[in-house]
Image (tube, rainbow, N blue to C red):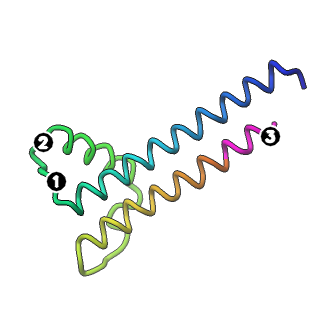
């Protein structure tokens, strides 16, 4: 393989990993804001919540714990872990080829 092709694949893999990291960071930030009882009237908090809700649409309220904080941590945390795992697996696969 030519060095030019490898550089492009390396850059694509890096971008994929960074996107996965940012998605997990947003989800983790929302979990932290929820646990610290952040002011939901704040525009930034509302933005983070909206984006996290969209990212975790498939895992939000997946678990039915009695405590709401446990549902938030499990639902949004699962999404963050899946995005990290899948994103980095794809990035590593792209780096190899």
Pointer 1 with pointer 2, Cβ within 8 A: yes
The residue that appears at 38% across and 68% down in the rendered structure is 74
Residue at 31% in and 77% down: 64
> How far is the residue under mark 3 from the one under mark 2?
44 Å
Mark drawn on residue 19: none
Q: Which residues are magenta?
A: 90-97
Question: At 32% across and 43% down in the image, what residue appears?
Answer: 51
- What is the number of the mark on residue 38? 1
Marks 3, 1: nearer the viewer: 1
Q: In which quadrant of the rendered image does the N terminus lie?
A: top right
Q: Secondary structure at mark 2?
A: loop
**Residue at numbered disc 3:** 96
Query: Magenta segment, principal secondary structure?
Result: helix
Comparing 37 with 52, the one in front is 37
Q: Earlier in the sequence, mark 3 or mark 1?
A: 1
Quarter of the image where the C terminus is located: top right
Q: Which residue in the protein does label 2 denote? A: 42
Q: Earlier in the sequence, mark 3 or mark 2?
A: 2
In the image, farthest residue toward the top: 4
Q: Position of residue 69 (x, y in %)?
A: 25, 70
Q: Residue at x 74, y 44 (%)?
A: 93
Element marked by disc 1 = loop
Image location of residue 95, percent across then percent down: 75, 38
Count of numbered circles on the image? 3
């Amino acid at each position: 393989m030519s060095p030019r092709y490898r550089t492009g694949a390396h850059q694509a893999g890096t971008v994929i990993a960074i996107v996965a990291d940012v998605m997990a960071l947003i989800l983790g930030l929302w979990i932290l804001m929820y646990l610290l009882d952040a002011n939901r009237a704040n525009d930034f908090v509302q933005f983070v919540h909206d984006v996290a809700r969209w990212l975790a649409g498939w895992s939000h309220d997946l678990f039915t714990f009695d405590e709401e904080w446990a549902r938030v941590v499990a639902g949004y945390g699962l999404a963050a872990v899946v995005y990290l795992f899948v994103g980095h697996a794809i990035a590593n696969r792209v780096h190899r080829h």
